[in-house]
Amino acid sequence: MSRKKRVLIVFVVIEAALAGIWWWLARYGMANPDRVTSDFQAVVGQTLGAAMGGLLGIGLILFLAAARNDRKAAQASTPHR
């Protein structure tokens, strides 16, 4: 499996986990309005949105690095003339 595919799989799993946490917290806040503060939904949205956005940026950088490493590995494995 190429490095690009591994990076994509890992980041899709992490982003899905963060989205699941976001969904769970949003539903918890709606189901229990007496247990959360009035700005709970906004804080959860801002916090997890920032986390997901930051991870997406890091994921892009890591994906580009993995693509470069895949190219280098492919060039190293081909015999030179």
Image (cartoon, rainbow, N blue to C red):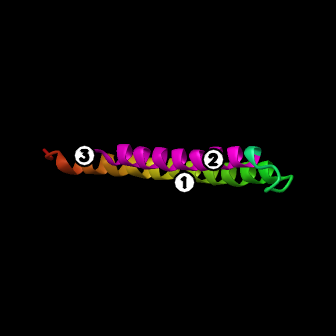
Kindly report which numbered mark, 1 or 2, lies closer to the viewer in this rendering.
2
Instruction: Please tell me whether mark 3 sits on a helix, a strand or a loop.
Output: helix
Instruction: Please tell me whether mark 2 sits on a helix, a strand or a loop.
Output: helix
Q: Residue 34: x, y in percent?
A: 83, 53
Q: Residue shown at 74%/45% (left/top)?
A: 31
Q: Earlier in the sequence, mark 1 or mark 2?
A: 2
> Tag 1: residue type?
Ile
> Tag 3: residue type?
Ala
Q: Residue furthest right?
A: 38
The one of 35 and 52 positioned closer to us in this rendering: 35
Q: CA distance from mark 1 to mark 3?
A: 24 Å
Question: Mark 3 Cα within 10 Å, few/some/many (few <14, many 20+)?
Answer: few
Q: Which residues are magenta?
A: 1-29
> Tag 2: residue type?
Trp
Q: CA distance from mark 3 to mark 2?
A: 43 Å
Cβ–Cβ under 8 Å for marks 1 and 2: no
Q: Residue shown at 25%/45% (left/top)?
A: 74
Q: Residue 65: x, y in percent?
A: 43, 52
Question: Would you say the magenta stretch is mainly helix, strand or loop?
Answer: helix
Kindly report which numbered mark, 1 or 3, lies closer to the viewer in this rendering.
1
Q: Disc 2 designates what residue?
A: 24
Q: Disc 3 designates what residue?
A: 74
Q: Disc 1 designates what residue?
A: 58
Horizontal placement of 2 versus 51: left or right?
left
Q: CA distance from mark 1 to mark 2?
A: 24 Å
Question: Mark 2 Cα within 10 Å, few/some/many (few <14, many 20+)?
Answer: few
Question: Mark 1 Cα within 10 Å, few/some/many (few <14, many 20+)?
Answer: few
Horizontal placement of 77 versus 70: left or right?
left
